[in-house]
Amino acid sequence: MAIVDTITNDYALWEALQKTDGYKNNFTIEGAKALQAYMEELSEETGEDIEFDPIAWCVEYTEYKNLREASKEYGEEAYFSEGQSFEDYTEVITFDGGVILRDF
């Protein structure tokens, strides 16, 4: 399976976001590439097509420099309480230079 729209390069999400005024700063180029790769892998694992929808992905996922930065937004207890981690609550995509969480 694959993303429904045919993607011809690893930077399609980044390129699509750069054409918008409101979403072009949601992800770094590395983050956009990591999220796109994650969606491709998810499609392969589930055997389901995933629609290439850059705006929806911006609404559902947030990029952070690291998990500490994310924990400040969600509150320290979301990450550090009772030995739990973000992985216990949501999807976590790590990449060189940051981390992306599915908002919860």
Image: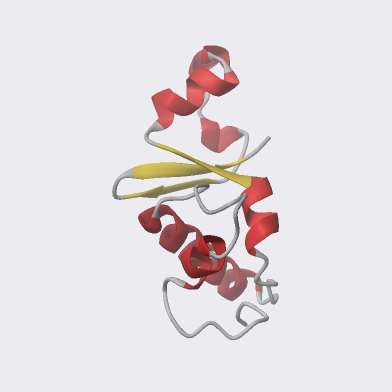
- Residue 85 screen position, x and y as percent: 50, 28
Q: Looking at the picture, does residue 59 appear above or below residue 83?
A: below
Image quarter of residue 3: bottom right
Q: Looking at the picture, does residue 89 appear above or below residue 50?
A: above
Q: Which residue shows up at 68% across the image and 71% down it? A: 50
Q: Which residue shows up at 49% across the image and 44% down it? A: 100
Image quarter of residue 62: top right
Q: From the image, which quarter does the N terminus lie in? A: bottom right
Image quarter of residue 54: bottom right
Colour scheme in the image? secondary structure
Q: Which residue shows up at 54% across the image and 71% down it? A: 40
**Front-most of residues 48 and 53:** 53
Q: Residue furthest front?
A: 21
Report whether 9 appears left or right of 103: left
- Residue 57 screen position, x and y as percent: 64, 55
Q: From the image, which quarter does the C terminus lie in? A: top right
Q: Looking at the picture, does residue 65 appear above or below residue 37?
A: above
